[in-house]
Amino acid sequence: MDSIALARSSVRWLHELTHRSGHTALILGGPDSNAVEVARLRDEIAMRGVPIIEDSVAMTVHASAPSGVARMTPGAAAVLGVSGTTLLVVRPDLHIGLRADRDHVGALERYCGVVQGTRRGHAL
């Protein structure tokens, strides 16, 4: 099973990063992603102060990732079907609430509207 090497050089299972009472945003950068853009997306989500997101974790397959961006193995990205930049929002029950492969911030805003009951639709 593939694992995630965090920025501090510890290795953890992906599910260990999502055990919390709120949602977790995972910003994943596959082989076709830009590691700087992965970090920018993480920072943008944090800057917006999305109420349901308790924590955000950015990771990439690229060895030269910006500070604070974890490293994941190419095998882990392949298992997750991640080639570019993907946003996964993991619910507190550890199920995936949202997967967005493009328009990440817009998809997150729509998802939050559904979760908070301010928008009609189906949570992904």
Image (tube, grey):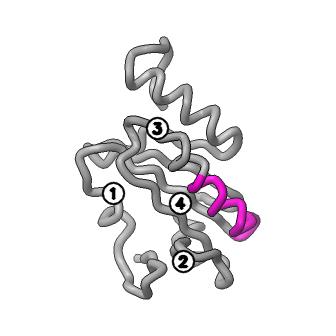
The residue nearer to you, when weighing 74 against 40, is 40
Which residue is drawn at the image coordinates 48% and 12% (left, top)? 120
- The residue beneath circle 2 is 71
Q: Position of residue 22 (x, y in %)?
A: 30, 44
**x then y, percent, for residue 46:** 51, 49
Q: Which mark is residue 57?
A: none
**In this picture, which residue range is highlighted in magenta?**
31-43
- Tell me which residue sits at (53%, 63%) in the image: 58
Asked if the residues shown at circle 4 and circle 2 are in contact, with their CB atoms under 8 angstroms apart, the answer is no
Circles 1 and 4: CB atoms closer than 8 Å: no
Task: Tell me the quarter of the picture where residue 30 sits.
Answer: bottom right
Q: Is residue 86 left or right of residue 15?
A: right
- Amino acid type, mark 2: Arg
Crowding around mark 1 (Cα neighbors within 10 Å: few <14, some 14 to 19, many 20+) is many
Find the distance from the CA under tag 4 to the CA under tag 2.
Answer: 14 Å
Classify mark 3: helix, strand or loop.
loop
36 in the magenta segment:
yes
**Disc 3 and disc 1: Cα gap in Å?**
16 Å
Residue linked to disc 1: 18
Give whichever of discs 2 and 3 has the lower sequence position: 3
Look at mark 3 in the image and give the residue it sits on. Answer: 50
Q: Which callout, 2 or 3, points to the residue nearer the camera?
A: 3
Instruction: Quickly name the residue at label 4.
Output: 80
